[in-house]
Amino acid sequence: MVGNKIVTGRRPRDGYVKSSFSDGGGQCVLVRRKEGDASVFLRDSKYQRNLRNRAEDEPIIELPEAVWLAFEDLVLNRVSDAAIADFLAMEYADDGSTVLRGPDGTMLLFTEAEWSAFRAGLAGGEFEPRTVAA
């Protein structure tokens, strides 16, 4: 991220964490939030389970840190989505799943269980910036 512009192509592979509420079955919302970094990255652990998937093609959504803070508030039902509209769209389906869409069209689909675990971890402060990548 440079200023308020997302730098496409930046796709860190390390430092992602999942919620401790996740079931451990490889279906998790993964978050990379490193201290001092201007961006937060989101990805879906299901992508890595398919050995035919290429790491360089993995869908990753990059958010400016300020947008991440608004996203937290939205996920935890504290505010509306107006603050993130230019960077991220969230859609809730009738089956409980959640879809995140980045401004470049990147899409991440999470099951109800994955999203619930992510929300619980977010509420518990599990995605605070880390000084060293995990």
Image: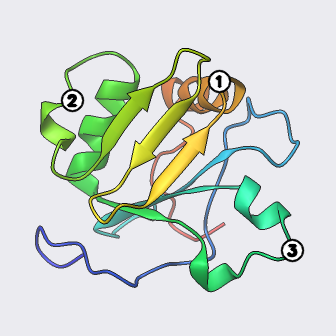
Out of 128 and 88, give the one closest to the viewer: 88
- The quadrant in which the N terminus is found is bottom left
The amino acid at mark 1 is Glu
Out of 21 and 48, give the one closest to the viewer: 48
Residue 81: mark = 2
The amino acid at mark 2 is Asp
Q: Position of residue 49 (x, y in %)?
A: 84, 62
Disc nearer the start of the sequence (3/1): 3
> Which quadrant holds residue 111?
top right
Q: Position of residue 65 (x, y in %)?
A: 27, 56
What element does badge 3 sit on? Answer: loop
**Label 3 crowd (10 A; few <14 / some 14-19 / many >=20):** few
Residue 124: mark = none
Q: CA distance from mark 3 to mark 2?
A: 35 Å
With respect to residue 12, does 114 lie above or below?
Answer: above
Q: Residue at x 57, y 70 (%)?
A: 132
Q: Position of residue 45 (x, y in %)?
A: 71, 55
Left/right of residue 59 with respect to residue 66 in the rendered view:
right
Q: Residue at x 62, y 23 (%)?
A: 116
What element does badge 1 sit on? Answer: helix
Q: CA distance from mark 3 to mark 1?
A: 24 Å
> Which quadrant holds residue 47?
bottom right
Residue at mark 1 = 112
Residue at mark 3 = 51
